[in-house]
Amino acid sequence: MVQQVIFPSRQASAEFPGATSGPKRDGAVDVAPGVAVGFRAYVPREGCDRVALHFHGNAEVCGEADDIAPVFHAAGFALVSVDYRGYGWSTGSPGVTHLCGDADAVLDFLVKGGVPGIAEGCKVVAWGRSIGALSAVHLAASRAASVHGLVVDSGLMSIASLPMVKQLAATMGAGEMLGGLKDPTAAPFGATTLRKAQTVGCPSLVLHGDRDEIAPASQGLGCFNALGAPDKVHERFAAAGHNDVLATELARWSAAVAALLAKAAAFENSHPARAAVETHALSAEKFNGKKGVIVAPAKVDAGAPPRARVQFEDAAMGEKAIKLANLAVVDRAPYLA
């Protein structure tokens, strides 16, 4: 029931299939056996090493980012807009449970140089609009070593709490069932989107219209409050709804995004979430050489040395906030499937 409401899939044909030159290049990424999702790459120059990875809203397709691509090009970023299963020239059927796994596959394809004209190992900003925010937050949290910035644009955090979903459930007498609906994007490490947001450490921007009738402004505020990023900005548009932010606030929107892109271009995450680490140079010798995994950035007072929350292998140590200077990164980018 929810998926039928969430995914009114739209088909479109690739206009630049297989293009390896020119400003627009259409292609597809294999995300599962026999299933591929389409993308359009807007490439400002050959060998571009910065890219915004765009997960659009549920009523859009990837070829509709033409008008906004110049904002990213002006900041030196390519733009890759990706469809969901069953959209555009993608194959398969859309589904909420596919969102995060497909996003992982697209990111892997991108940073390995799969898109013509975009350099291998490129810096990535994850930009999610509306339902696309679920994919963008997921990548910023679970793939922190590869993602250097996050934009949550009119984003939803909880499908079950959307007004249209609640209304449909009430109409069908399925209120109790809706109350027990589990977050279908909780994979791969058992966290809801808001829980994932707590582990995000890269520069982050939340954009939301106060009159949003589809994903209420409270969802944007909840995302901003949850984000663990030390550098985060919340831009609210008093007169805008869900689908008219660009029509009413293009200048403010563009300025905020440009500022985020500049931060992301300069951001280097020496201790990303999910990295395997080992303690060293602690004053208490018995605590040196302990291994663990970074969970999230730790909140510290202004001027204090940066720290990270570490979950140690030794159950007796539990989770502790440790100065980055005392953490040696053993594996910067382990990926937990």
Image (cartoon, rainbow, N blue to C red):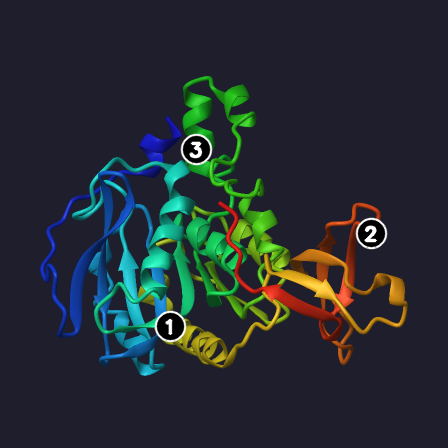
* Amino acid type, mark 2: Met
Seen in the picture, residue 202 relative to 304 is either above or below; the reply is above
User: Between disc 2 and disc 3, whose residue precedes?
Assistant: 3
Q: How far is disc 2 from disc 3 in space, using C-alphas?
A: 43 Å
Which one is in front, 116 or 198? Answer: 116
Residue 298, horizontal then vertical, whole percent: 72, 64
Circle 1 or circle 3, nearest the eye: 1
* Amino acid type, mark 1: Cys
Circle 2 or circle 3, nearest the eye: 2
Which structural element holds mark 3? helix
The answer, for residue 244, to whether it is visible in the render is no
- The crowd level at tag 2 (other Cα within 10 Å; few <14, some 14-19, many 20+) is few
The residue that appears at 89% across and 72% down in the rendered structure is 283
Q: Which mark is residue 141?
A: none
Q: Is residue 284 left or right of 246 when viewed as pictured?
A: right
Seen in the picture, residue 279 relative to 36 is either above or below; the reply is below
Residue located beneath label 2 in the image: 317
* Amino acid type, mark 3: Val
Circle 2 or circle 1, nearest the eye: 2
Residue located beneath label 1 in the image: 122
Q: How far is disc 1 from disc 3 in space, using C-alphas?
A: 38 Å
User: Between disc 1 and disc 3, whose residue precedes?
Assistant: 1
Q: Are marks 2 and 1 in contact (CB under 8 Å)?
A: no
Residue located beneath label 3 in the image: 165
Which structural element holds mark 2? loop
User: Between disc 2 and disc 1, whose residue precedes?
Assistant: 1
